[in-house]
DNA sequence: GATATATTTGACCAAATAATTAAACTATAA
DNA sequence: TTATAGTTTAATTATTTGGTCAAATATATC
């Protein structure tokens, strides 16, 4: 029964992920999740007790995925410029496969800021900064990136890749009306964003 | 009674705006709005019939405000570089006063894409492009901004000012933990974003 | 194969919440 | 002052929805 057990619990988790990402915690209905999984609603409570616990399971998984994606950049033996290109290629490719994540994630944090506690321990900008500084002292100096401006620099990079997805539905609509293709725009953005940021810091 | 009439209807609208921006359509409660306005819940229905109609009134007002803010930039007699500086100063100052708007707006569109119809007629990127092209032909050529890359360029500008607010709660939390001040970061962003974009296109 | 355990289901419950209603109250006009 | 129309309120209703429960079914163990 372990086999079927896993299958059901997994089906629930996957359906819950899809529905929560689409509708958010407040907009999602337990019945929608059950229907999406093709099972009886009571099974959701059998495996996860409450909507809140089910949501938390989904949210924590997603938060983990999101932040583990940032780490490898610093391990690579690349120049700062190459790391920037590497990051945009990887990150935008990831978001292409999970386009609803930014909107879901940011909105749920907005709804309930207390949830930040569940993953903020994984984030350490200061450590990231000291690592960066150790690896790229010369380049950072040349590009005028200091401890002072790290937040500006980091959020600009995040903005360049995340914003098109956070505003995806709106942006795609406007583009369609104007005769542009959103998927094409995103594909080209991997390179555009990297060029843009590198030019910006090279001054 | 017209006096009091306007007062009540206005109070409802303002409270509804505050609550909807904070909680979203799904998370907002009619009772919360009534409490916020200090009135009886039935008055909400007396003036706006349903939650949906009240929400639509609020949403349309906000959508109108948001897009009217983009237009004036083009009227100014400034160089492209000056226009970029002007835009970030104005736009970020506006968002400082309305920090919850981006998250609210993008999320509600995500929840119900059909609402885009209510304001998309006000958006015409092609017209904006021809206007820009007429005013700054030389600069655009120099900066390598073409009809092809306008979406990349425009969304990059939007991203630089909107993203810090769309991700405000998360970003502010991380910054607080790391010893940075979010309000200071935002104030400095007016200039940083302009410098960043101008450097980026100057190559 | 019989018994125990785990899983699944449909019916049901209780709380939350949007919406309605009738009565009370207030202001305006005759 | 009285009548009328407009406004506000408290009580109530209807619906939605998260959660429970007991019975039914499937699976594992002996």
Image (spheres, coloured by chain):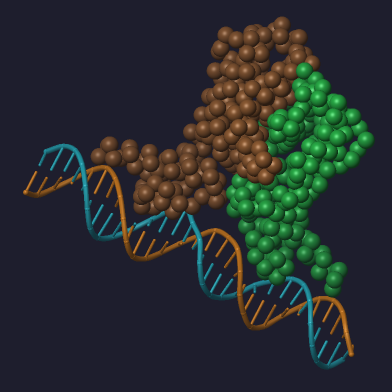
Chain colours: A green, B brown, C cyan, D orange
- Residue found at the very far top of the displayed protein: B138
Q: Is residue A137 above or below residue A52?
A: above
Count of number-bearing discs? 0
Residue at the image position 79 percent from the left and 49 percent from the top: A65
**Frontmost residue, C12 versus B155:** B155
Image location (x, y in percent) of residue B87:
60, 20
Quarter of the rendering containing residue A142: top right
Residue B26 vertical position relative to residue B72 in the rendered view, above or below: below
Q: Where, by quadrant of the figure, is residue B183 drawn?
A: top right
Q: Residue at x 91, y 32 (%)?
A: A78
**Occupied quadrant, residue D16:** bottom right
Residue at 56% x, 36% y is B99
Direction right: furthest residue = A77
Please, is residue B87 above or below residue B53 in the view?
above
Q: Is any atom of residue B115 visible in this view?
A: no
Give the image location of residue B25, x and y in percent.
54, 47
- B174 relative to B97 in the view: left or right: right
- Residue D8: percent from left, percent from top: 30, 50
Q: As displayed, is residue A14 above or below residue B200?
A: below
The picture places residue A66, in percent across and down from the top left corner, at 77, 46
Q: Quadrant of the C terminus of chain A?
A: top right
Q: Is residue A201 left or right of residue B27?
A: right
Q: Quadrant of the N terminus of chain A?
A: bottom right
Can the viewer see residue B6 in this picture? yes
User: What residue sits 64% from the left and 60% below the top?
Assistant: A52
């Amino acid at each position: 029964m372990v086999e079927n057990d896993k299958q059901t619990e997994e089906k629930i988790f996957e359906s819950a992920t899809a529905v929560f990402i689409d509708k958010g915690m407040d907009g999602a209905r337990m019945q929608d999740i059950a229907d999406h999984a093709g099972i009886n609603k009571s099974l959701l409570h059998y495996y996860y007790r409450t909507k809140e616990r089910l949501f938390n399971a989904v949210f924590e998984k997603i938060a983990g995925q999101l932040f583990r994606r940032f780490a490898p950049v610093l391990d690579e033996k690349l120049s700062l410029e190459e790391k920037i290109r590497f990051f945009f290629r990887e990150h935008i490719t990831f978001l292409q496969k999970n386009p609803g994540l930014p909107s879901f994630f940011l909105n749920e944090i907005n709804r309930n800021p207390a949830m930040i506690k569940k993953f903020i321990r994984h984030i350490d900008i200061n450590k990231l900064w000291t690592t960066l500084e150790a690896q790229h002292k010369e380049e950072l100096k040349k590009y005028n990136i200091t401890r002072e401006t790290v937040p500006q620099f980091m959020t600009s990079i995040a903005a360049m890749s995340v914003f098109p997805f956070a505003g995806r539905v709106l942006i795609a609509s406007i583009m369609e009306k104007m005769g542009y293709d959103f998927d094409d725009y995103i594909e080209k953005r991997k390179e555009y964003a990297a060029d843009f940021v590198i030019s910006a810091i090279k001054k």
